[in-house]
Amino acid sequence: MHRRGLGLKTRTAEGVTHEAMDPKDVDIDFDDVVIEPNPLGTNHQQKRPPLTTSFTLDNRVLEVDGGGPEDLPLIHQSVVERIHGDSDYRPISLRRVKHRVMYNNGDVGNPAEGLETHLKESRLLAMPLPEGTRKKIIVQSHLKNNRSFVFVEKGKSYWFDVAQAQTWSDASITCGPGGWTLGAQQQGLGVARSAVIASMGPLRRNPAADWFEVVGVVGDDKGEKVRPLQHTSPNQPWTPQSSGELILYANDVDFLYGNNMGSITVEIVRS
Ligand SMILES: [Ca+2]
């Protein structure tokens, strides 16, 4: 929307003042503006009379027009997430059909042999990063955990390539990947709000990092912490002390992710 320059302003779901709307004119509430694709959601009306079903439902067919043998059908990662999360979802169209999975960051995985490949695993796997390669990770600020699909290995060396000009927003504060500090924002926030925010500082998921700084953990919140911006060149490598999937997020308090907006891209590089 921003790229198309339509002049529209975007707000977080929490930033919409529902009280100011007259319910007689517009009946919009919080749940109407929270748009969060759910791979496990209902994808269409599930129950229809048998006769209607035969007319209105058909299995999707996966095919690639005009491609060579290497041009396999692409399915989005959410299809695989649904296969793993919903034991009733076994799309017939994927049976024995060789295909590839496309991830949110645009990466395309190795060929999969039909449904079988996905049923053998319980979730999409994080893979080790080969030496000298890099991987793009999209970090959505409103998501508490952004999977990287990168399995970092104990004792190996990594660094992060992060474009500093990117921005994302924590309620009314727009900042870069490095986040914001109370000192710099105090004037705009006012004394009372600043005091409340200061009291919540220790509750941040990574209290040592700034508000909204892009930070990470190995595995989950109980795992090793990493601050990618402290490792932005091969000369300042990050050497994990444990192995597991790298998870990234905007540093915030657990219950304050609802007013976050935007995303940034981080690249992890294996030295
Ligand atoms: Ca927030």
Image (cartoon, grey):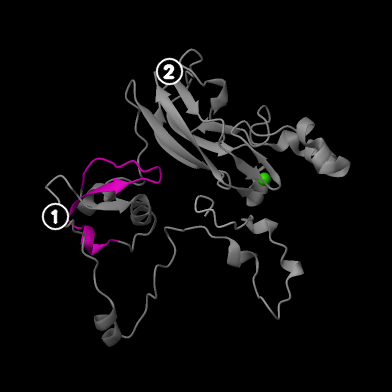
Q: Residue furthest left?
A: 69
Q: Is residue 88 above or below residue 266?
A: below
Foreground of the two, 241 or 270: 270
Name the residue beneath numbered marker 1: 66
Q: Residue 101's spot in the image, x, y percent?
A: 29, 47
179 vs 42, nearest the viewer: 179
Dot 2 alpha-carbon crowd within 10 angstroms: few under 14, some 14 to 19, many 20 or more: some
Q: Is residue 85 above or below residue 210?
A: below
Check disc 1 and report its element: helix, strand or loop: loop
- Residue 103 in sight: yes
Disc 1 residue type (three-letter):
Gly
Residue 196 makes an appearance in the image: no
- The extreme right residue here reads 191
Residue drawn where x is 28% and y is 41% of the image: 109
On-image quarter of the C terminus: top left
Q: Label 2 amino acid?
A: Ser
Instruction: Say which residue appears at 64% left-offset and 64% top-offset.
Output: 30
Q: Pointer 2: what residue?
A: 157
Q: Position of residue 121 (x, y in %)?
A: 31, 45
Which region is colored magenta? 90-112
Please tell me whether residue 111 is drawn above or below residue 176 in the rendered image. Answer: below
Task: Give coordinates of residue 16: x percent, y percent.
Answer: 69, 61
